[in-house]
Amino acid sequence: MANIMIRQADNGGLVFYLPKRDLEASIQSIEFDSPEKWGGELKLDNGGAYYIDPIARPPRLPISLRAKRLGAAED
Amino acid sequence: MAVLTREETEALIAEVLEVYPDKAKKDRAKHLAVNDQSVEQSKKCITSNRKSLPGVMTIRGCAYAGSKGVVWGPIKDMIHISHGPVGCGQYSRAGRRNYYVGTTGVDSFGTMNFTSDFQEKDIVFGGDKKLAKLIEEIEQLFPLHKGISVQSECPIGLIGDDIEAVSKKASAAIDKPVVPVRCEGFRGVSQSLGHHIANDTIRDWVLDKRDGKAYDSTPYDVAIIGDYNIGGDAWASRILLEEMGLRVVAQWSGDGTIAEMMNTPKVKLNLLHCYRSMNYISRHMEEKYGIPWMEYNFFGPTKIIESLRKIADFFDDSIREKCEQVIARYQPMMDEIIAKYKPRLQGKKVMLYVGGLRPRHVIGAYEDLGMEVVGTGYEFAHNDDYDRTIKEMGNATLLYDDITGFEFEEFVKRIKPDMVGSGIKEKYIFQKMGIPLRQMHSWDYSGPYHGYDGFAIFARDMDIALSNPVWHNMTPPWKKAEPEAAQKAA
């Protein structure tokens, strides 16, 4: 489990940020994206995948969350 | 356009790496790359933020350098204790030219060195008592200080001192913030982790101390983040923002105070100059206080205009209008400078190797002068910095991460730039090779280089470095005469 931060990108997409490793990547897909259920598996553009517990869609980004890495560590 | 083609640059890298043993070669190869603007993600071509190889000459610093030297050190009304043996503080004292206004030793302490001067007995029995006594003495001798930060040197982490407990107790006793910073030098691979640690301590111990208190804010409040006022840089940036009609509430941390930092959560926009060292606190303020942040670049008129417009777009039309007025007012001055220096500097090639933001930010300023950056690299960048650099650099130019002394010399010998921009450790090596070098860390004791006023100084400095007549006299007379004599004999 790692603390991560999700923020809005200038182009409208979402950006994933892992402070511990200074890893910044844009989120290509998010498993659940509705107002009441938001989160699940996040696929990053660097090939990594993370899982966040689905929550209600946060009213304001950025938000810090706990995430679990799926698969091997990417660079 | 680069001097070498892609294939030639690749061959050059391979050739330079030839001297290393296999394992070292494999490791260093990942840190050297030929720029390709079509690459979206830098990690596909360059590896960064990795431990330096033992045995090579690296110019990186340590976490203490990143925290005490860069982030905390310039806060002028606080006393930063170098907690541990005397050397770390003494040899880094006042070296970074973070200018400030104030009376040193009375209400400002920027160039002074405070240290707990660890001796053998402090290592054996612990230094907590000494630290408590030191804080007491500081309070007595310098009553106008506004707070203390305890910057740990390596031994503190090794002997397990509890500086947090001492700090909390002392803070209650003197009724001023006392911030323990766990920035022992052995942490991380470079000064970069020190920046992060320092940002985290500011977040935890300083930033929220005035939350909920009344504050007269205006809709035009901004903070300058990550400008360390080297040679007066932050002042040259600040006047432009003020002329635009914005109110600069805080300077982080060049010529900054702790009160400014506590007021920063009230601003409307954070302007981030050094992304590498202060993106952490900007991200935190965005999440906690909803303050947007943007990166800007005040090197060279092209980038200044771009950045000023981008900043103005966050505000209403009155600011946008004033922004255009500012640009129009300075344009004749810029045209004059470019007309004067561009013919003298046109086509000159530069290689850079600096720290946090300059390897990419100054490229625009060189291009405004008609110069060309043919190689660039960072001491301690992460992948996100290279993501931003790839777009700024020409195709087939060299990128090098945490370059070693040997590699840098070999690259310069082969690429033969007209000038190198790096630090004091490189300066005399390259000047003895006959290549002018400007220090891009300390602006070679000149500056400021930020803003319109800074560009005038930048252009002049580059010209005096390149046009110095000494570069025509690099061959001693007895060697100059030789070919002629040989011809006569033949």
Image (tube, coloured by chain):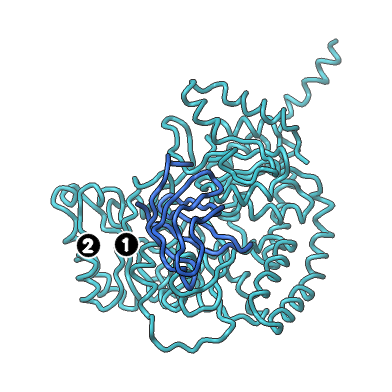
Chain colours: A blue, B cyan
At numbered mark 1, what does the secondary structure look like: helix, strand or loop?
Answer: strand
* Residue occupying the point 23% across, 65% down: B134
Residue located beneath label 2 in the image: B131
User: In this view, which residue lies farthest toward the left?
Assistant: B125
Looking at the image, residue B301 sits to the left or right of residue B33; the answer is right
Q: Which amino acid, mark 1?
A: Ile
User: In this view, which residue lies farthest toward the top?
Assistant: B490
**Quarter assignment of residue B412:** top right
Q: Which mark is residue A45?
A: none
Subunit of label 2: B
Place of residue B399 in the rendered image (x, y in percent of width and height, measured from the top left): 62, 40
| Mark 2 touches mark 1? (CB < 8 Å) | yes
Residue located beneath label 1 in the image: B81
- Assign the N terminus of chain B to one quadrant of the image: top right
Q: Which amino acid, mark 2?
A: Leu
| Mark 2 neighbour density, 10 Å: few (under 14) some (14–19) many (20 or more) | many
* Residue occupying the point 65% across, 82% down: B245
